[in-house]
Image (cartoon, rainbow, N blue to C red):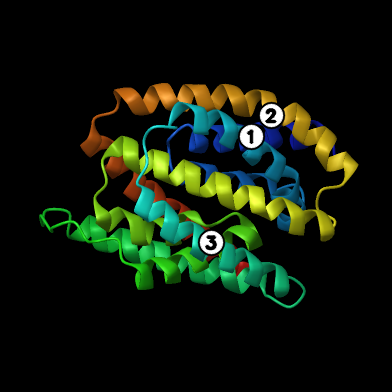
Amino acid sequence: MQGETFWILAVISSICVGLGKGGLPVIGMLAVPVLALVISPIAAAGMLLPVYVLSDMIGLYNYRRDFDRRVLAIMMVGMTVGVGLGWATAKIVSEDLVTLIVGLMGAIFALNLILRHKEDRPAKEARWPGGMFWGTVTGFTSFVSHSGGPPFQVWVLPLKLSKSVFVGTSIIAFSYVNAIKLVPYYFLGQLNPDNLRIAAVLMVPAGLAVIGGVRLVRILPDQVFFRIVVWALLVVSIKLIWDGAIG
């Protein structure tokens, strides 16, 4: 498991995690699929969780002043419910089916934004019913396969937050969900000593990638940034559809 190919893909995965936590949403979702080329998706998710948590800490420091309190409050409640559902159904849920559904949701939403990008629609209000639903889906899919990005963006992008607030809110929300996943992941045996030793090595490139991501976000114009977010969402969603379909 620790051959040359493994380490190359593991480092690439950790860089994806870091860039995602540095403010380039969705890119972090590529981490598990990349590492899953050499180990099982479940093992990849467990191995990378500590890397996500450390990267969260660096991202939190850089975006500690940029967030929307209402959006966070709603999402955190929903995410907690979603993680609980994921833990309760861990033995029976079909990861492939969840991956396929998440991919379909993200692709439909991204295509809708791309095809209607010229329409200047007013920002939606952050309401509890919709936020609770998408927050629960985000927590559940994040628990199952670290793929909470698409459902999170389905709800948050229409709110039309500023670039910095969007990034900060996303980082804080997923820092929270990754932290509460540690306990169930431990009891499900996904945080074993071997995984933790490998994760400790991967934290170095991930941490450097977070810093690089933060700097890149700061120089990107808002319009270019959100265009990247939407297209990245589409690409990742297509990859999830493929993964879910072929099992």
Residue closest to the far right = 193
Numbered tag placed on residue 75 in the rendering: none
Q: Identify the amino acid type marked 2.
A: Met
Q: Residue tagged by mark 3?
A: 79
**Earlier sequence position, callout 1 versus callout 3:** 1
User: Which is in the foreground here, disc 1 or disc 3?
Assistant: 3
Q: Position of residue 178 (x, y in %)?
A: 62, 49
Q: Identify the amino acid type marked 3.
A: Met
Report how many numbered discs are placed on residues in the image. Answer: 3
Q: Residue at x 36, y 35 (%)?
A: 66
Q: Quadrant of the N terminus?
A: top right
Tag 2 and tag 1, C-beta contact below 8 Å: yes
Q: Position of residue 193 (x, y in %)?
A: 89, 41
Residue toward you, 18 or 136: 136
Q: Is residue 193 above or below residue 4?
A: below
**Earlier sequence position, callout 2 versus callout 1:** 1
Q: Position of residue 172 (x, y in %)?
A: 49, 43
Q: Residue tagged by mark 1?
A: 14
Q: Residue tagged by mark 2?
A: 203
Residue toward you, 154 or 239: 154
The answer, for residue 138, to whether it is visible in the render is no
Residue 105 shown left or right of residue 136 in the figure:
left
Residue closest to the far bottom = 92
Q: CA distance from mark 1 to mark 3?
A: 24 Å
For label 1, the crowd category at 10 Å Cα-Cα, with few meaning under 14, some 14 to 19 and many 20 or more, is many
Q: Identify the amino acid type marked 1.
A: Ser
For label 3, the crowd category at 10 Å Cα-Cα, with few meaning under 14, some 14 to 19 and many 20 or more, is many
Q: Residue at x 58, y 58 (%)?
A: 142
